[in-house]
Amino acid sequence: MEHSKRSFFRIAAFLTLTGTPLTVLGQEQPTAPKEPEKNSRYVAEEPETNGFAMEMHSSTSWDDNILGDNAHRIRDYVFEEGGRLSLWTRKPSWRLGLDYRPNALIYKTASGFNQVDQRLDFDNEFHTGRHLLFKLKDSVDYATGILEPQTNGNVSLPGSGGSSLNNTIITPFARQFGNDASGEIEYQASLRSSLDFSGGHGFRRFKNIGNPNPSFATSLFNTQTDTGSGSYNYRMTKHLTTSLEYRFENFRFSPVFHTRTQGGYLKLLWEASPYVTFSIYGGAENADSLGQFQVPSTNPLQPGNTTVTLRTLQWNPGGGGSVTFRSNQTVFRLTGQRLVADGGGLLAAVTTSYEGAEVRQRFAARWDVALTASNARSVALQGPSGKGVVDTQAAGMAIEHAIVQTLSIHVGYDYLRQRTNQFVPFALNADRNRFTLGIFYRTRDFVF
């Protein structure tokens, strides 16, 4: 009897030290609701547990505004040759994903604009214990513009990603070098509750490679941003999770332009069915902005411009949400948000309101159609005589037909429209139409 008691206490002490609750020993914890993926893949298109795949594309486009600037409109044919290399693996204690996309652009007439765009995405998570999860993400891109060939399954709305950089604004024809890195720690405090802490750093730099105005790119706002957040998550039911989050961001555009924001949000994540997910968050954020502006001098003894320094403190409502439906035949997504963000190079800090929708449908005889539409308004937080405003709309349609399982024909159309008011320092109005015909070849998934 005494021996049995000692054995029981030893087992209890071991389970306590290793963090394994007695009440759940031998039970598998149910999977908590997760944020829906940002791509447009069907449920059946999810990759295998471990493997890699290669994709190659060749396309021809007619673009009626390759610079994205109505004041310097140039029409030309664009030939694009590129590919995609994806590697992924999943184990019980860790997961790794790597995605590399090179794309060469060759212009028929404006050969001085020929270039090679590149993007690399890294996504990793690993468990260091039963209750502790680490996540690391990094995205690096070196590109011009926002249009690139992609299959319907990789379509995503410009404002729906998790990036800390604003990608809803069209910038002029200048090289952009950007990086967005983040890390997250998730601690599972109990079966229902968890704590999340995250931090990240991102930057976007511009370099001119052929814009008619050689000083334009050097005048754009380069951006650096530091972010941090902490949240408490509580699982109300099997399919419903609520969270309280505190978020901090520091935007730096130059030594004389910077903005710091702090905000609190209530979040809700609900898996209404195996195919439908709702994600909603709302709250308020405080923005502290400092900037220097050139204004006409009112002193007759000192004609020309003079420098004024402005500092503003303001509270803004913030929030957003999405609804996602995903099955083997249909993907439907509505998303919207209102937050303080960078001005995409045209402005310093702005309040951005964004709405977007995307639909993908699979038809008979291997036909596939994807439709996207979005609207965004960015309003500067500061201005000496008025606040700069940038309105951007985008729409796209893509039709794919699979000749065989690995080879498909792609026909697409994209429309971009942007308007700026008189208070935007580097006014850029754009109307852009782009028609694309291409071929995509994707190898089968190599499982290992």
Image: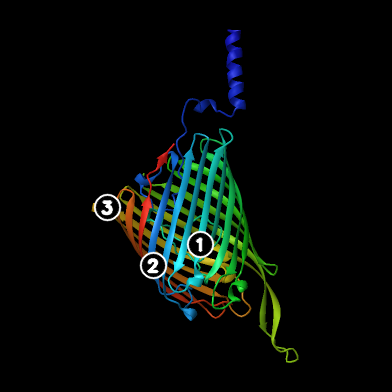
> Which numbered disc flags the more N-terminal residue, 2 or 1?
2
Question: Mark 3 sits on what residue?
Answer: 366
Asked if labels 2 and 3 touch by Cβ distance under 8 angstroms, the answer is no
The residue under label 3 is which amino acid type? Arg
**Image point 50% across, 70% down: which residue?**
113
Look at mark 2 in the image and give the residue it sits on: 61
The residue sitting at the top extreme is: 1
Rounded to the nearest whole Å, what is the CA distance between mark 2 and mark 1? 16 Å
The image position of residue 406, as x and y in percent, is 34, 49
Relative to 384, is 322 on the left or the right? left
At label 2, which amino acid type do we have? Answer: Ser
User: Which residue type carries mark 1?
Assistant: Val
Q: Would you say the residues marked 2 and 1 are in contact, meaning their CB atoms lie under 8 Å apart?
A: no
> Which mark sits nearer the N-terminus, 3 or 1?
1
Mark 1, secondary structure of its residue: strand
**Residue 221 against residue 229 in the figure, above or below:** below
Distance of mark 3 from mark 2, alpha carbons? 23 Å
Q: Residue at x 41, y 60 (%)?
A: 149
Q: What is the crowding at mark 1: few (fewer than 14 residues within 10 Å), some, or many (at least 20)?
A: some
Residue 324 image offset from top left, x and y in percent: 39, 53
Question: Of residues 164 and 249, which is closer to you in this image?
Answer: 164
Q: Residue at x 41, y 65 (%)?
A: 79
User: What distance separates the C-alpha of mark 3 from that of mark 1?
Assistant: 32 Å
| Quarter of the rendering occupied by the C terminus | top left
Which residue of the protein is positioned furthest toward the right in this rendering? 301
Rendered location of residue 32, percent (x, y):
46, 40
Rendered position, 307 above or below 35: below
Can the viewer see residue 249 in this picture?
A: no
Label 2 environment density (alpha carbons within 10 Å; few <14, some 14–19, many ≥20): many
The residue under label 1 is 116
Residue sitting farthest toward the left:
365
Query: Which of the 4 image quarters holds residue 164?
Result: bottom right
